[in-house]
Image (cartoon, rainbow, N blue to C red):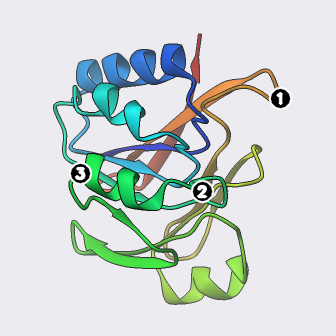
Amino acid sequence: MKLGIISDSHDNIEAIRYVVELFNREGVDLTIHLGDIVSPFCFDYFNKLKSPFLGIFGNNDGEVLFLQQKSEGKLHKPPYEVELDGKEFILMHEPFGLNKLAKEYDYVLYGHLHRVDLRETERGYIINPGELCGCLTKKRTAVILNTKENRAVLTTVP
């Protein structure tokens, strides 16, 4: 399964448009957003994804009701556990207990720090895709994870 993983888009429509095109071109099977979408109108762009969308709320997602409506229930409160392709995932925005969780889950995904973190573990990976918005680091990044090959690739978004 090919997963497109992003976090901290913070209403950056240009970056959202690009990553949607990238994930559609790459044939991503599922897009995962790890929080801080911020405004419900971003779903006007995320809804152009060819893949299903799964996300969690971040600390800057204040419009919870409207985000939930616009996402059609695809956003969840973190931490959120899900099984994908026979692998166990935990999704969170703010990191906690990463090394401990890496012993319990195949993939530990988080955001919030606006810094890339790709660490291979005994079971899989710890992944923070960095920030899609580029507001703190001036780098807009995403990760494409192939669960069949257990390979995570960092992608820079222009």
Q: Nearer the viewer, mark 3 or mark 1?
A: 1
Chain-order first, disc 3 or disc 1: 3
Mark 1: which amino acid? Thr
Mark 2: which amino acid? Ile
Chain-order first, disc 2 or disc 1: 2
Q: How crowded is the residue under tag 2: few (<14 C-alpha within 10 Å), some, or many (20+)?
A: many
**Residue at numbered disc 1:** 137
**Residue at numbered disc 3:** 1
**Residue at numbered disc 2:** 127
Q: How crowded is the residue under tag 3: few (<14 C-alpha within 10 Å), some, or many (20+)?
A: some
Q: How crowded is the residue under tag 1: few (<14 C-alpha within 10 Å), some, or many (20+)?
A: few
- Asked which quadrant contains residue 155, the reply is top right
Q: Nearer the viewer, mark 2 or mark 1?
A: 1
Q: On screen, 117 above or below 135?
A: below
Tag 3 and tag 1, C-beta contact below 8 Å: no
Look at the numbered disc 2 and give the secondary structure of its residue: strand
Q: Position of residue 95 (x, y in %)?
A: 71, 70
Q: Position of residue 79 (x, y in %)?
A: 51, 78
CA gap between label 2 and label 1 equals 17 Å
